Image (spheres, rainbow, N blue to C red):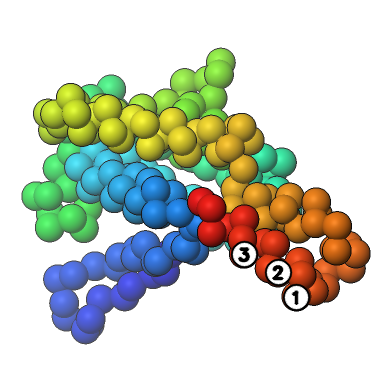
Amino acid sequence: MRFKPPPQHDSKIGWRVEFRTMDIQLTDFENACLIIILGLVVNVINHFNVDFIIPISKADDNMKRAHFRNALLSEKFWFNKNCVQSERYWESNLHKSDFTSSKNDYSDFVKPEYEEMYIYEILKGKEGSSFKGIFPLIKKFMEVKKYSEKNIENIEFMMHFICSRARGSVPTGAAFIREIINQTPTYKHDSKLSHCTMTILVSQLMRL
């Protein structure tokens, strides 16, 4: 992600956040899952009364933790557990302000509360907490926008795949490659990949 400032000082366009291209995955299906789910997250932000903003210091903490090996499973990340702003969160006035402000009346504003959670909890919701999770919000969006049963089925399959990866039952691309290399007889665990090791790795990846 990156911040995009207004194009000029007198522009009606406010500050924006741009989702940047993600790391390419090993298969087309994985790429499709991430792109489609991210698009739905954008729709939730634009059409629902939610607040995913966290302080930049906590975003920096999240970025540092994300660089650790196996961070998806072993690290917790800061998130606003009070991201849902009202009981009828699917009703938002964001479009009335050209997507610059979600409301004019802050009388029912829910104060942010930041909590460390695993990625799986951020996606599915945290047990014993009022935090809904991002995926239930996506399901509500599909309901409100009257997605077809077939589209809902396909998207829920993608969400299930991503949740399985967040729980560790489906390895990440990095974990999958490390496992292949570690099991290669010619690899000496010195971070140096011989021609033979690379040949075995490529042959395994070609089977995907």
Q: Which residue is mark 1?
A: 195
Q: Report the residue marked by disc 2.
A: 198
Residue at horizontal 75%, vertical 75%?
195
Q: Residue furthest left?
A: 96
Pointer 2 with pointer 1, Cβ within 8 A: yes
Q: Would residue 89 be seen by someone viewing this image from the given angle?
A: no
Indicate whether 186 appears above or below 51.
Answer: below
Front residue of 48 and 71: 71
- To which quarter of the image does residue 182 belong? bottom right
Above or below: residue 140 compared with residue 174:
above
Are circles 3 and 1 on residues that touch, CB within 8 Å?
no
Q: Secondary structure at mark 3?
A: helix
Residue in the picture at 85% in, 63% down? 187
Which label's residue is closer to the chain start, 3 or 1? 1
Q: CA distance from mark 2 to mark 1?
A: 5 Å
Q: Residues within 10 Å of mark 3 (few under 14, many from 20)?
A: few
For the image shown, how many numbered marks are present on the structure?
3
> Could you give the CA–CA distance between mark 3 and mark 1, rounded to whole angstroms?
10 Å
Foreground of the two, 59 or 192 = 192
Q: Is residue 172 above or below residue 138?
A: below
Q: Are marks 2 and 3 in contact (CB under 8 Å)?
A: yes
Left or right: where does residue 196 sit relative to residue 137? right
Q: Amino acid at mark 2?
A: Met
Mark 3 lies on residue: 202
For label 1, the SS is: helix
**Alpha carbon distance from label 2 to label 3:** 6 Å
Horizontal arrangement in the rendering, residue 29 relative to residue 69 (left or right): left
Would you call the spot at circle 2 few (<14 residues within 10 Å), some (14-19), or many (20 or more)? some
Q: Does residue 150 appear in this view?
A: yes
Residue 74: x %, y % from top left: 71, 41
Give the amino acid type for the residue marked by disc 3 in the picture.
Val
Residue 160 in the image, given as x and y percentages of width and height? 44, 31
